[in-house]
Image (tube, rainbow, N blue to C red):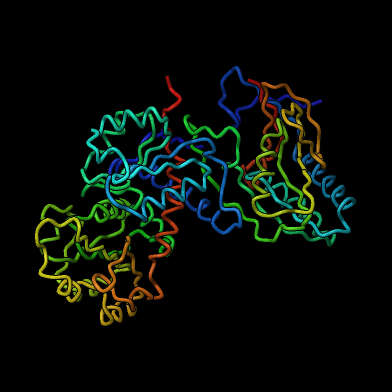
Amino acid sequence: MPLRVLCKVDLLSDSPNITTEALLSPERIESAVISLAREIKVRCGDHDFAFVGIFTRGVTLAKRVAKRLAEEGINCPVGTLDISLYRDDFDNEGTDLPRLESSDISFPIDGTRVILFDEVIFTGRTIRAALDGLMDYGRPSKIELAVLIDRGHREIPIQPDYVGEVVPSEMNQYVKVRFVEDDDKEGVFLVTK
Amino acid sequence: MSDLKPRKDLLDIGSLGLDEIEYVLGNAVPFKQLFQRSVKKVPTLRGKTVLNLFYEPSTRTSSSFEVAANRMSADVTNFSVSSSSISKGESLLDTIETLQAMQSDYIVIRHQAAGVPNIVANHTRASVINAGDGYHAHPTQALLDTMTFREVHPDYAGKRIAIVGDVLHSRVARSTSTLFHKQGIEVGVLGPGALIPEGRPAFMQRFQSWEDVFDWKPHAIYLLRVQMERQEGQFFPSVAEYHKMYGMNSDRLVSVRKLGAYLMHPGPVNRGVEVTDEAMSYEKSLISTQVENGIAVRMAVLHWLKPETQKD
């Protein structure tokens, strides 16, 4: 059972109509990272592979899993990908002014087995954009997907290969992952408006 | 998240906030990195239309905008004065009406009269980007110059740049010096008396000679193009005289090299007038970087502006 905490958080405003539940504790996140690392080791351990994280927290997740694997003597490079320019909902007429990040894939990806990382998979559209972005860097031999949280509600046929936790959610809710590296706090939260 | 207000048009530098300048220059960096990939194109503006409307001859600015738009997957139409009905006497507003009917999302405009981009912007829902109007403004040039200078001097505040040449007729000088000044970069000018405006901004200090410039220890020297086509009167005795007095020759290059200063020029270069062949191959010339950064900055500008073409 998720622990229900009503608290002021940075996630959204502290309007009375918004509730925030803590879904995963820092310990649960750590064990999910360990299980992702274990699964990737079992399935890819004999091959060369590379990680590519989607900004911002996909990068953090990829680095954490890579660190686990490095402790077991398996080293793989970690690249970063900003998919803002590939989104299917880029709003050139609205108010959204995204700040772009520099993608950094400094290893050749042609013929490489690439595992993409994102913190949450929801509709699948972000991953669709990431696949387009990644393939503009080259032609990997295989692309797989690892996520910390699968919250369901796919809108396109994309499924993750490695999942830390499955979290049921409603369409009108938000699943927010917070990592200390990016947010000065750690946890997975379910926000209901 | 960003608290920037959306902006429809980019008409000058003076009206930009520092946060907007940081936003565009910050986004230009990832755009520039795309040029290292084998696929340099992104799908961001797929299905959008960019119209290049040039009432004055221009190869490099119009090509730069064209490349920028192409790399964002927009469709580009080039409309230039010699090949359109503008030369058949169509009025500006009729042209705008026609363009409106074509439903362009972005209009890049260069015109010999200052203020024309503002008029176009007020009469169209498309985003209007001023690519140079008379002696007034050339904002994307200023942005690319600033990006280029900041790349070599990340701690740019308090640095010094000397602008040399025809400041009077130069919208580049006007826009670029305004933006440098906004960034806390000091600006000095050197040029023939008739080409240094009397009413220049107070922050522009004037030098009488190259020696004065070198004593000031500038971090970059920005050579302006001698604009033969934009001078109705005689502002200096001859091109040879200009070169002798203000051109970047071998002797001056020695001093520039000793200072470790960078060389900038907006292009196209008049070799043998403002710069010699030798100076063109100076190892700290930023001229090609300016061209490259021009594309990145223009991509960032197209990405930033919000047309109102879908509004009722």
Looking at the image, can residue B27 be seen? yes
Q: Position of residue B193 (x, y in %)?
A: 10, 64
User: Could you say where residue B83 lies in the image, as x and y percent from the top left?
Assistant: 32, 44
Residue at horizontal 20 percent and vertical 57 percent from the top: B229
Quadrant occupied by the N terminus of chain A? top right
**In the displayed structure, would residue A142 be above or below residue A18?**
below
Give the mark count: 0
Q: Nearer the viewer, residue B268 or B196?
A: B268
Q: Residue at x 81, y 60 (%)?
A: A48
Percent x, y of residue B148: 40, 60
State which quadrant residue B202 falls in: bottom left
* Residue B13 can be seen, yes or no: no
Taking the image as shown, residue B285 lies to the left or right of residue B195, namely right
> From what the image shows, is residue B286 above or below residue B118?
below
Residue farthest to the top, as pictured = A17
The one nearer the camera, B53 or B194, is B53
Q: Quadrant of residue A188?
A: top right
> Where is B175 relative to A1, above or below?
below
Examine the image and state in which quarter residue B154 appears.
bottom left
Give left or right: position of B178 versus A20: left
**What percent of the width, then of the height, locates residue A143?**
77, 48
Residue at image position (52%, 32%) is A91
* In front of the other: A80 or B251: B251
Q: Which quadrant holds the C terminus of chain A?
A: top right
Lateral position of residue B51 relative to residue B218, left or right? right
